[in-house]
Image (spheres, rainbow, N blue to C red):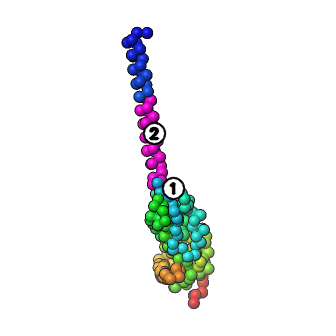
Amino acid sequence: MTLVTSWRNCTFRVLEVWATVALLLISAQAARSQQLRESPNTKFFIDRIELTGNRRIQTDTIMSHIFARPGDPYNTEAIKRDAQALRNTGYFDEVRLRIEDSPDRPDGKTVAFDVREKPLVVLIEYKGIRSITEAEIVQSLKENKVDLSVGSQFDNTVLKHATTIIEELLSKRGRPAATVKPTYERNGNSNVVTILFTVDEAPKTGASTNSHPRMQ
């Protein structure tokens, strides 16, 4: 083997070593970057989880919808998903997320969910109905799967749907021009709602399939 050939072989080996080292460094850096993207804020841990605002709904029920637990690495996106999961339960008018530094450990975070429960319906009244009965309204709401009754959670969207159902029922009884105006009153202290449907049946048109005595 000549001196030139030996020198070339040595040079190739050095280049191969440097290429291997460079690839390892690039791979390590890429893996680290991927880890940071997948687990942001992992230098912090969840020290405690707090719930505030729940009255009727038990804490255990709420916690069953939260995946995070004390001692877990703190992950902003995961905590936001837990907050959204609580909103999706339909139990609450509002869910607010608070993140605070733990008073007990420098690397700890306190995760707090502040909730405001939907109120309960305690009374439903109808004013001005003559062509239909309250029992028929209740049955029609049930058939259309509208959950509005005493003891149900109040939801303004459900209230609007119920209004449409009552107007449709009146229309079938020859009152197509009837109007139904829903109003409600919320008691903040007891978190309950009373509902009043005020009905203007308007002049009757066409023949009615059933007749009902005037309701007192």
Q: Relative to 169, is 30 above or below?
A: above
Q: Residue at x 59, y 79 (%)?
A: 150
| Foreground residue among 147 and 14 | 14
Image location of residue 161, percent across then percent down: 51, 71
Q: Quadrant of residue 99?
A: bottom left
Q: Disc 1 marks which residue?
A: 73
Question: Would residue 18 be found to the left or right of residue 78 on screen?
Answer: left
Callout 2, which amino acid?
Ala
Which residue is the site of mark 2? Answer: 28
Residue 36, position as x, y percentages in the image: 45, 48
Is residue 141 magenta-colored?
no
- Name the quarter where the C terminus is drawn: bottom right
Give whichever of 43, 192 is nearer the camera.
43
Coordinates of residue 100 in the picture (x, y in percent)? 44, 65
Marking on residue 36: none
Magenta: main secondary structure equals helix
The span shown in magenta is 19-42
What is the quadrant of the N terminus in the image?
top left
Amino acid tagged 1: Pro
Vertical side of 39 occupied by 67: above or below: below
Q: Residue at x 43, y 25 (%)?
A: 16
Residue at horizontal 52 percent and vertical 79 percent from the top:
191
